[in-house]
Structure formats: C-alpha cells, structure tokens
Amino acid sequence: MSKYHYIGWYISPLLENEYTGNVPGKLKMRYIAKKIVESGNQLTVLSLAEKKGEFFYSKKVHVEGDIKIIYTGGCGRKGKIWRFINEGMKKIQFCFYILKECKKDDTIILYHSVTYTKLLARLKHFFNRKVVCEVEEIYGYSAIEDKVWVNKEIEAIKKMDLFIFVNAGIPKLLGIDQSKYVVSYGVCNIPERQNERFDDGKIHVVYAGTVENRKLGAMTAVETAQYLSEEYVVHIIGFGKQDAINSLQAEIQKVNQSVGNHALVQYDGYKSGEELDQFLFQCHIGLSSNVMRPNFANNSFPSKVITYMCHDLSVVLGYADAFYSVPEAKKWTFYMSHDPHAIAEAIVRAPVVRKGYYKDDIRRLDLSLNKFFKQ
C-alpha cells in the first residue's frame, strides 16, 4: 500500500463550521482525497485551512474514515502584521511536516499555490521525494492582468515530478510530457436525483458560484437576464461578501423593474451539499459567465461546468481555446464575447438535454483519475 501526503486547504464536511476556505478548492480536495483512498492508498492530509474566530489556534488531528487530517495551527487575527505571523507559522509547520513525516517511498500531492509550490521547490533540493502538483490555476495569469512573477510561478511548478492539471491546455503551455500528468476538470460525482425539473412552462437558467466585485460572474448573469424573454427565469445562487450581495440584489431589482417587475432574475442565496444538488436538478441550463481574458481562461477551468454536467444541465460558457479542445465541448454552448447580449443569445441556442445525457462522460473522466493513482 502506497502512502500519500495531500497538502492544501482541506476542510472536512464535519468541521466546516470551524474552518474557512475556498469552496471550489475544498470540494476538489475532498474528491481527490476520495480517489486516492479508493485506489488502495494510505492517505494523510495536512490542511493549511484557517480556523474561524480564534486569535491563536493550535494543531488539530481529525480522522475521517480512512483519512487522517492534520489541521495546522495559526493566528486568526486580522491585520497585516498578524497575517505575516500566521503565514510564518503555517510555513514552519509545512516545512517540518515535509522533512519529518514524508518518507523516501511516500508521495506528496501539493494543491498548488504560488507560496507553497515555490517553498516546496526549494525543499526538493534537500530531499528526494516524489511530488505531484495539483494545478487548478496559474495565478500569475489573473482575471485582470499578467503578474510580473508569473514566470517564477511556472518555474516552480515545473520542478515537480507529476501533475494533476485542471485542463489539457496548461501542460501544453508548460511543455509537460503526456506521461507525467492527468487532467481532472472537476468533481465528477453524480448525486441521486430527488427533485424533478421546474414544470411551470419556463426554462430555468442557474448561475452557481461566487458573488464578487472582481470577476463579476454573478453580476454578468443578472445583466444577461434583461435580454431574455419571459420564457426564461435566471437564478443566482452563491456566496460572497455582504457589499457584493447588496450590489447584486440592487441590480436584480433594477433589471426586474425594467421588464415591468416580472421576476426574470432572482437571488436564491447560498446553497451547499444536498440542498444545492436538488436545486440544480430542478433547473435546465447552467451558466458559467467566466472571464474570457485568454491567459486567464486558458490557464484555469470553471469548476461549475462539471457540476452542471453532473446535474443534467445544458452548459453555456465563454469560449477559450483550452475549453474548446475538451472532448465534451461538443456538448456545450459557447458565447464568443463577454457581453450580456451575446451570452443571452447563447442561452437561447442551448438545448434542454435529457436526464443522464453526460453520464458516460462523467464516468470516463472519473476513471482517468482512478487509473492515475493506481499507477
């Protein structure tokens, strides 16, 4: 039995009220962890997640089925100095764990971040361990601009041994041999359907994701609604800071008033787990109003796309070369400009797919990850 060490911002479903972290990230880590164990491997997770509402918090060990999780200690107080102290504490625990707990025949899987990938790249000079780097995004290619340090980030990634990439375009960009990586587009779990689709004569479009003022995905979905007929209802579900939620709700009110107070678009709050699954099952079309800036889009992948497929939703998303090369892309509907009118036209073109339409695609994607860990 091989021993794996998975390092990132993992949060157990049982401890979600204690720790905070990026929602797509924690869901993807749970999925990868499950695949590691299912493939007959022993797994220990080192979690760098932040604990909620505590000044200083200590290390905590938690066992979840076949997975041992070690939550690092840290400092939860806000402020630049305290964040610096917290980062230092996390880095020390990270280094100590790598050097003390990871044995010669073990495999380390690192959920890529700029800071920790660079740190591990330096540590690799002093010890010989196999490292798998899970790259969900190249952060130097941001939604706004290319960062000056992006080449340093890429250099650190390429020092790892094997890879899990979120799309097939990134390894081509990095010049990674095909034998050294697997592509995992998202969480390939198909839940059990309990709810049927809305049956009110309307087509229900859903945007599920972050509500924020930077990438503006949710806001773009609201603006798109005004170009749809009364045959459609647009649902926004997601989480975000209160100021972003307030801005979103103000825009929703404005759009609905512009069409005579018809409930063309509505914010349905934050949903997760079973509640999210069953809500998505009720809808017809899933919208990913992703940023289309080429360097950003080609070096990331909207996790919601696979989530939509697992819930029998037609997928509407912005074009990117890396997305269009995906074998499943022929089943998606693309818009070619990040413009509400163009997005609305794509929604109208999208068919309502039958239940189970993507089942074989999801199984194939899921099996490729199992095969990677068994090898």
Image (spheres, helix red, strand yellow):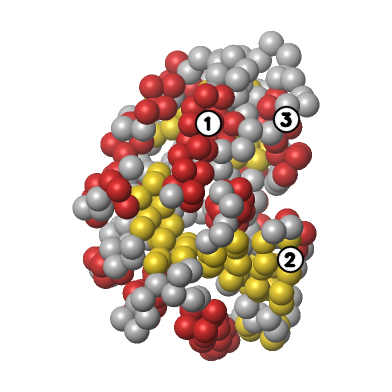
Q: Amino acid at mark 2?
A: Val
Contact between marks 1 and 2 (CB within 8 A): the answer is no
Q: Amino acid at mark 1?
A: Ile
Q: Secondary structure at mark 2?
A: strand
Q: Residue furthest left?
A: 175
Q: Is residue 22 visible?
A: no
Q: How many marks do you count on the picture?
A: 3
Q: Is residue 25 visible?
A: yes
Is tag 1's residue or tag 2's residue first in the polypeptide sequence? 2
The residue identified by callout 3 is 192
Does 85 sit above or below residue 67?
Answer: below
Quadrant that contains the N terminus: bottom right
User: Mark 2 Cα within 10 Å, few/some/many (few <14, many 20+)?
Assistant: few
Q: With 151 as the anchor, is 37 left or right in this view?
A: right
User: 261 or 285, which is in the foreground?
Assistant: 285
The residue identified by callout 1 is 362
